[in-house]
Image: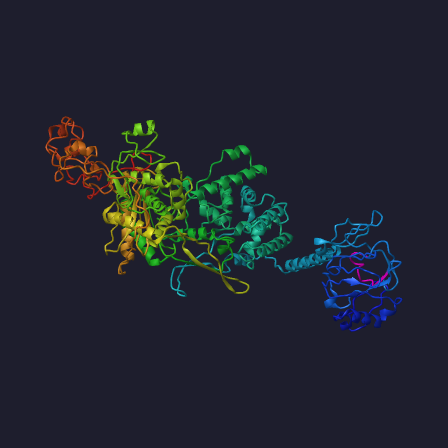
Amino acid sequence: MSNPPYGSGGPSGDLPEDDWFRPAPPQGREQIYRESQYGNSAPPTQYGAYDEYGDQSGFADQNGYVPAQQGYDDHTSFDAAGGQAFGQQYDGQGYGDQGYGDHYADQTYADQSYAAHQNGYEAHDGYGADPAVTVLDGGPIQVDNPPGVDVGDDGGRGGGGRGRGRRGKGGGGKEGWKKYVPNWKIVAAVCAVGLVAMLGLVGIGYASTPTPDLTNSANLQEGVDFQRTSVYWDGKKGKEKVMFSMAANREDVELAAVPVHVRQAVMAAEQRGFETDPGISIKGMTRAAMKTVTGGSVEGGSTITQQLARNRLNTLSTDRSVTRKVKEIFTALKLEGKYSKDEIMKNYLNTIPFGRNASGIQAASKAYFWKDISKLSVEEGAMLAAMIQQPGYFCGWDDPKKEDLPCHTALVDRWNYVLNGMVTEGWLEKGKRDAMKFPKVKENAAPQSDSQQAYILDRVLSELGQIPDFDETAVTTSGGYKIYTSLNPKLMDYAEEAVKKAGPDATLSKKNEKIIRSGLVVVDPKDGSIVAFYGGNPKRNMPNAALVDQPQIGSSFKPYVLATALSEGFNVKSLIEGRGLICLDKTTGDVIADAKSETVCQDQRGGYWMRSAHSEGQAITLVKATEQSINSSFVKLGIKVGLDKVIAKAKDFGLPTEGMDPANPSLSLGVSNVPAMYQAAGYAAFSNGGTAYTPHLITKITHKDSGTGKESEVPLPWKKKQVLTEDQAAQATEAMRAVVTSGTGKEARLVNGQPAAGKTGTTDEGAATWFVGYTPQYSAAATVYHQKSKSMEPYIGESASYGGHYPALIWKAFMDKALAGSDLEQFPTPTYTGDTMKWDTLKPKPTKTDKCGPIEQIMNQCENNGHGDGGGGQQDLPGCQVGQLPPACDATKPPPGTENDPPDWFCVAHADYPACATQDGGDQAHVDNDGDGVTADQDPNDYDPNVPNQQNNGQGQGNRQTAQ
């Protein structure tokens, strides 16, 4: 270390650094100074002694200075006035540990002449404005007064230090935060150096970025096919088999062959200023940068040229990172500098992905409209332009129910955006635009069989689009990915076989196969992964019935209402209303006793009328309510626990809840539309002990960098959430096991005795039917529904239009095959945590002296005899039937007052009774009380719910409420 620097005129020292910085007693320091070359620079003086840092002695000289109380501060000044005491602590470069760094000499106190070396306090606060102060080389300086001392307006005291005085003239010291702020010149210098370095790096980056050769067709194709993306079946690590490769179909076309209106539509969709922009969009980049800075994901903002750069330059990574965006910008600028706008547009249109495995506008034109690009209409061109934004999500199939699909609604919105943009840019007349309708899309001609490959590809692309900051289009444009799925080829075959053989497909004509749809999806309860599905024949160009289409779910929604009650602290032994044809208060759920008809209930009392005649008694357990699918039980339960909580719980299970209305009591009966995939995943939470998983079929993605050869793994976003405790899940399972063993889903019982649980679902008029069930190994949802949400009865018969029939049979057919040879696995036994709530209580049983006749039975004044298993209808009305006669019942006569017009239940048992033979419906060849398609004269069990029980008892606010 060198001697302390001196100011102008100050001699440079040559003493050893120890002489300057070693601690020394006061006299020792004075001696060091006197022996130095500076000791002769001034007349002999008496030097004051400095004690160690913080010592109470402070500074004292021979002329009467009063010692300072806390040492000197290196930012404070000396006052020339004798006897002035300063209470400032020395917190700078203390003499105790850094030697004699500053030197002060009381040269002539009488005339206030000080001698001090230049580097003393001159840099901070001076020694006072009044005295003549010199440095050791004799040069005068102007200094300030000590802090906190005011000598009047002309003295300028009170500046600089920690004192309370005002800053005087010339006060140059830095206080507080100012002492930490560097000189502006230093800041400017650092910024300049940083800017130069940054510009240098930008220049190096730009210079090192290659320019793609757009004139070489081989190079052009390389960007699409240089590495294929492969999709794999599930399998042991290292032994996975390739399912298919995702190489895009592509057919190049000259720009002149592309209609001008198609090019304009693409510009309206992606970059309206393409013809004048320099290849990058400052506005778009600013928007993307703001989103990134504010914590959002890295956004796009890419121009057409930037998109081409991304598609063409293999070295660009596929994540939406800032680094990739910079490389993309460099490449775009180089493309703009080398090629014309027409060349850029041509190459863009020939490589951009459009969905349906089509890369390029010509391939897309043939995939969606079966025509050459040159023959596209304005409407069709605008639709293809709209597809560019989200080709993996938008769906454009010509589906009678397409308006219900969010993917189609989103595409129509984007299509409107494109056309409106064309009007704004002056490329399309507003009158013509207003007259345009969304074009009809042809079937996808790609699938050559009814395999599920096309549906798998759609689902893979959809899941890729859910991965944050991942460019899903890169899997087909640049490749190099390995996508591993949970799909099991053997289970896929079982699913297809179950739908085709156990469902209605075998009995339907080809025409009706597009009207009556069937689907099955199977999920592994351990992680929510999809192991198998069958969504219908892709050749028919219909939505995937297992993963995409959204039938109304009916009573298969009721387990989520049950789960809400369990989460709210109630157990399945709780008692609740179980009667039909009653009026419920919409706010409290309580029965409005004096409202005996639908008109009185709704119009006069503002209640909710339960149309189903199916009754299990005034107070039944939640297990019985689930087993028999009692509508009144679940409407009341939903109101009691809170319909807003029901919606929240359904969302926790993973169901889409958009459109669910907490003010509608029928919500508990399943009025929402949900893809089967979410149903299978939702019920999986009951199977695995209460954990809901995001349904998915992608289990792993790896990417091999074409430049380095390094393989990396893409993080997946699938989530899980604990929605029930293990015991709550076990209680729900007990209720749904009863559905299979003795309730509405008996046709789903498995042949090997494997315990199973589930729930049926049937909507108004039998438009959609469900069976969703599970074992410890699998959770599966089977659905059969009308594509246009109309009754299926004309196509498959009334007896089959229930969830307990075809859907249950499809589910059973799959499970029997999938579990064949497997060991039986048991469900956990519930411990019934939670309160046993009695929302309703049983009426006392009639005594032996009570008369229980037909009228009393009809009025529900007798003990319930347990007829029916959830099918509903008149078979649930008690009456005088053979084998079930109350002691006071005369089976040969109708109830009093009905002798001339006996009720149907009486005539079924007494067809020869005169009044029965003459009344409408008395002919038993036309009476079908349980709705199973077999008339009473041929059906000895016309009231027996077990052979079978398919009477409609409706749901929602339609003509009938369906309990199944």
State the image coordinates of residue 519 (x, y, percent, origin top left): 33, 48
Note whether 469 is above or below 926 in the view shown.
Answer: below
Q: Which region is colored magenta?
A: 114-126
Residue 517 seen from this side: no
Task: Specify whether residue 111 is in view.
Answer: yes
Q: Is residue 729 above or below residue 902?
A: below
Q: Is residue 361 left or right of residue 785?
A: right
Expressed as whole percent of the image width and height from the top left, the position of residue 379 reads 49, 39
Number of marks in picture: 0
Front residue of this view, candidates 279 and 623: 623
| Horizontal side, residue 630 vs residue 400: left or right | left
User: Which quarter of the figure is the C terminus placed in?
Assistant: top left
Image position, residue 635 (x, y; %): 32, 38
Q: Main secondary structure of the magenta part?
A: loop
Q: Residue at x 51, y 53 (%)?
A: 471
- Left/right placement of residue 661 relative to residue 704 reads left
Rendering quarter of residue 752 = bottom left
Figure colour scheme: rainbow
Residue 901, picture quadrant: top left
Give 952 or 692, whichever is nearer the viewer: 692
Task: Judge from the rendering whether residue 575 lies leftward or rightward of residue 405; answer left or right.
Answer: left
Q: Nearer the viewer, residue 868 or 158?
A: 158
> Looking at the figure, which quarter contains the N terminus?
bottom right
| Residue 304 versus residue 894 in the image, above or below | below
- Res 882 → quadrant: top left
Q: Magenta span has 70?
A: no
